[in-house]
Image (cartoon, rainbow, N blue to C red):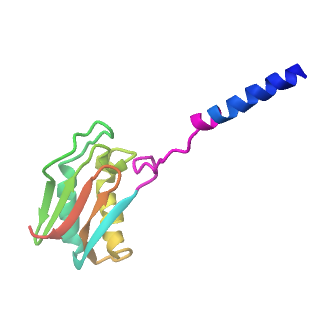
Amino acid sequence: MRNFQAFSLLFAFSVPALSIAIRESNQTADACTPFDHAWTTQCWYHAVPIADASIAIKRACQQLQTCIPGEQAPMTMPAQGKAPGVTAQIRLGKQCGNAETNWGEVCEAYFGRYVDNGCGGKGNTTHYYLGYAKSQCDGTFLGINYGG
């Protein structure tokens, strides 16, 4: 009987202490986790010839061939690439837009995925849609607009 009383007392005090130690946290999903490429896109609902857009994007990407996630100093001024009538801009954040490979290898593809495709250009082989995309992970910015 004595063992039962001792066990009951131990159980009575340990369960509330355990429930205090294991509280539910208010954690939110980390936008910088691998394979969670959360980007917001703003579209201008205009398009330019794909050849001009490609030149501007390539010129902007050539300025930023390397970016090491976690070691990149967030940029205050964007890198720009220009072509007749088109300007592409890139502003890298600390995590390189959550790129899991070398930035130079994914830069142009990110424009296609997050700006052009995000604005409705998927499968269009003649025009590139204008707009911008911003990584929710680190604020990396990719934009293409009139100008040049």
Residues shaded magenta = 18-37
77 inside magenta stretch: no
Quadrant in which residue 41 is drawn: bottom left
Count of numbered circles in the view? 0
Determine the residue positioned at 20% across, 51% down.
Answer: 62
137 or 64: nearer the viewer: 137
48 or 118: nearer the viewer: 118
Is 13 left or right of 115, judged from the image as shown? right
55 or 116: nearer the viewer: 116
Determine the residue positioned at 15% across, 48% down.
Answer: 76
Residue placed furthest toward the top: 2
| Above or below, comparing residue 123 to residue 99 in the picture | below
Q: Position of residue 88 (x, y in %)?
A: 18, 62
Q: Position of residue 143 (x, y in %)?
A: 22, 63
Q: Position of residue 144 (x, y in %)?
A: 20, 66
Is 146 left or right of 99, judged from the image as shown? left
Q: Position of residue 50 (x, y in %)?
A: 24, 72
